[in-house]
Amino acid sequence: MDLYAAVAPHDHGMLDVGDGHRVYWEVRGNPNGKPAVAAHGGPGSGCGPFWQRLFDPEAYRVVLFDQRGCGRSTPDAGDWTVDLSTNTTHHLLADMERLREHLGIDRWLVIGGSWGSVLGLAYAQRHPDRVTEAILFSIPTRPRRANEWITRSMGRVFPAEWARFRDGVPEEDRDGDLAGAYARLLADPDPEVRERAAVTWCEWEDTHVATGRDPKPDPRYQDPAFRMTFARLVTHYWSNGCWLDDDELPDGAAKLAGVPGVLVHGRLDISSPLDDAWELAQRWPGSELVVVGEAAHGAGHPDMQNALLAATDRFRGR
């Protein structure tokens, strides 16, 4: 299956969500189609047109938005002077509800990948009456365990690369929370310290997702502005456990009884191992787990895209 063609936004704007934040949003596809909203990854990646291409633009009204502090939303978290205290999972969940109300949407399909699957799952559990279906991929359901896995345990898979990553923080921080140590470096007044930390963090990001066939570096990390925004937000979120208890999302799966879900996960996804998605599928009544044999993390593999397209095509008539 091929991705659907990208279509231009027919509506867009900046939504004032409070705390000095303005969130960029846009709507693509059929203005009278079935509503769907995309929760992008990162945190800090921003939402590009790829997400709309997972949906038939004649059948869906696709809402894309850049989460607080990234993409076209303001202020930019890449500015080290920007306070991140009002940029948390709970703020983003409230932003999604405010955006739904702003657009006059009663219920919508939620799609999310990687960090976006955490956000989408948390949103669906908090507002199950506002979600028609959920499609999630590359799913880490326990953020605190995921932080420990990515920043420490993955050293068993990539020992040399992890040693460089660990040694990117001061020696006294190397046995502690590495995400928190990087977050402090990324808030340092010295621009050289911040830049070195952003580069090292993003090099490690490229490494721990590199388990598929012929992995390629993410070209976005070559952009200093993107790199800084992404690194600052990721370290902020992961060092705080995404403000979620580790049992919260698995235990909350029962709240989604009656909400159809499709969970798509790569067998080779070492960055977010399959057991989280498998456990979620066991505990979510009416969900389906699709395991893609040759895929790693993210939706880059054609078979991952095919599984996601099959899910959106199935739900377009509901």
Image (tube, rainbow, N blue to C red):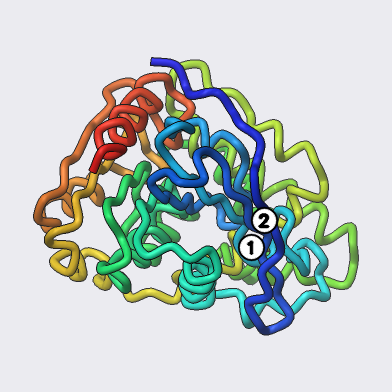
Q: Secondary structure at mark 1?
A: helix
Which quadrant is home to the C terminus? top left
Residue found 23% across the figure and 31% down from its top? 291
- Residue 96 at least partly seen: yes
Q: Quadrant of residue 234?
A: bottom right
Residue 296 in the image: x percent, y percent?
40, 30
* Left or right: where 195 falls relative to 100: right
In the depicted view, which residue is nearer to us: 258 or 101?
Answer: 101
Separation (CA) of disc 1 from disc 2 = 6 Å
Determine whether 10 is above or below 123 in the image.
Answer: above
Residue wearing tag 1: 233
- Which labelled disc corresponds to residue 99? none
- Which labelled disc corresponds to residue 231? 2
In the depicted view, which residue is nearer to us: 292 or 240?
Answer: 292
Residue found 81% across the figure and 60% down from its top? 194
Which quadrant is home to the N terminus? top left
Look at the numbered discs 1 and 2 and tell me whether their residues touch, using CB distance below 8 Å.
Answer: yes
* Left or right: where 263 falls relative to 300: left
Disc 2 marks a residue whose amino acid type is Ala
Residue found 63% across the figure and 29% down from its top? 217
Residue furthest out toward the front: 32
Task: Please tell me how crowded label 2 is: few (under 14), some (14-19), or many (20+) other residues with Cα within 10 Å.
Answer: many
Residue found 44% across the figure and 16% down from its top? 2
* Left or right: where 270 falls relative to 240: left
Disc 1 marks a residue whose amino acid type is Leu
- Residue 176 at least partly seen: no
Determine whether 101 is above or below 193 in the image.
Answer: below
Residue 124 in the image: x percent, y percent?
31, 64
